[in-house]
Amino acid sequence: MESAVRLTAIPEGAVLLVQITDLHLPETAGSPVAGVDTDRNLRKVLGAMARSLPRKPDLVLATGDIADTGAASAYMRFQQYMNEVEAPVFGLPGNHDRASVLFDVWRGHVPEWIDTPAWRIVMLDSTLPGEDAGRLGPERLDRLRTALDSTTNHVLVVLHHHPVPVRSQWLDKYMLKDSSALFECIGGCEQVRAVLCGHVHQELDGRHPGMDASAHTPVRVLASPSTAFQFAPRTREYALDDAGPAYRWLLLHPDGTLDTTVEYLTANGARP
């Protein structure tokens, strides 16, 4: 991960953040991944964002699995696509990415945190080389503590792996292994408003601990569907869903509240 970023151009008021995740771009454009053209689906999502968002976004986050096999050519195409987005774009690696290649191609766009006038967006690399599951570990958790202790802003914590179960038996084997350490770290920090992740190729809006909204000071956990293809929810074994590509946008308000919506596209790229 790289140094912190301060977005001084963002005006006071709500910050419009767009999350795209699990792009799964192949080595060669047009090569199918899970039976779909993921480059084409990403371009459809970017087109829908340009047409449908309430206003131009203040920033875009790509939260992992940008490439399907970690090919440099996939990251170079991704960078070309992002050059067309009229907003700063940042991201982090997922389990399908080769982090060193991503960092090299996309240098300067993988910060440890992003500061806006009222919010700090903390970017956590949860990847483990050679594994599909994730782990933060002591060093990354220490950096998270530093990020929390050095700001009085509201905080959004962002990572790739899901830190709470989504109740799909096959998929939950690949969640964040030290999620309890993550929630112990952020549990005493009143500034943390939500945790945002990808990885699960489906929509989730719940609470920790135990997804129980009645728990004491529960932390909101948001997971988002993929720009490429979706997993069928609550399945014992791997299965795809017929939902179209999607993206999430969030309005981060100065008082620490947030509004969020997931936008799905149909197979032909239109909003349903």
Image: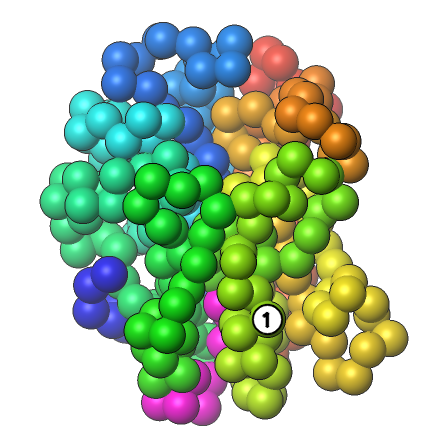
Q: What residue is drawn where x is 33% and y is 30%?
A: 67
Tell me: residue 184, above or below residue 240.
below
The amino acid on which the numbered mark 1 sits, given as a three-letter code, is Ser
Q: For label 1, count other residues whose C-alpha is less than 10 Å away and answer few (under 14), some (14-19) or many (20+).
A: few
Q: Look at 37% across and 27% down and name the residue there.
A: 68
- Quarter assignment of residue 6: bottom left
How many numbered callouts?
A: 1
Judged left or right of residue 164, residue 54 is left
Q: Looking at the picture, how far across and down is residue 197, in whole percent?
A: 53, 53
Picture layout, residue 205 above or below residue 20: below
Quadrant that contains the C terminus: top right
Determine if the magenta segment contains residue 58. no
For the point 78% across and 36% down, which residue is it?
A: 234
Q: Quadrant of the N terminus?
A: bottom left
Q: Residue beneath label 1, please?
A: 180
Is residue 88 or residue 141 the one in the foreground? 141
Say which residue appears at 52% left-offset and 9% top-offset: 35
* Residue at the far right in the pictured view: 214
Start-end of magenta stretch: 148-157
Q: Is residue 61 left or right of residue 200?
A: left
Q: Position of residue 130 (x, y in %)?
A: 34, 40
Relative image position of residue 72 (x, y in whole percent): 18, 29
Q: Nearer the viewer, residue 172 or 203?
A: 172
**Residue 48, position as x, y percentages in the image:** 52, 30
Residue 271 can be seen, yes or no: no
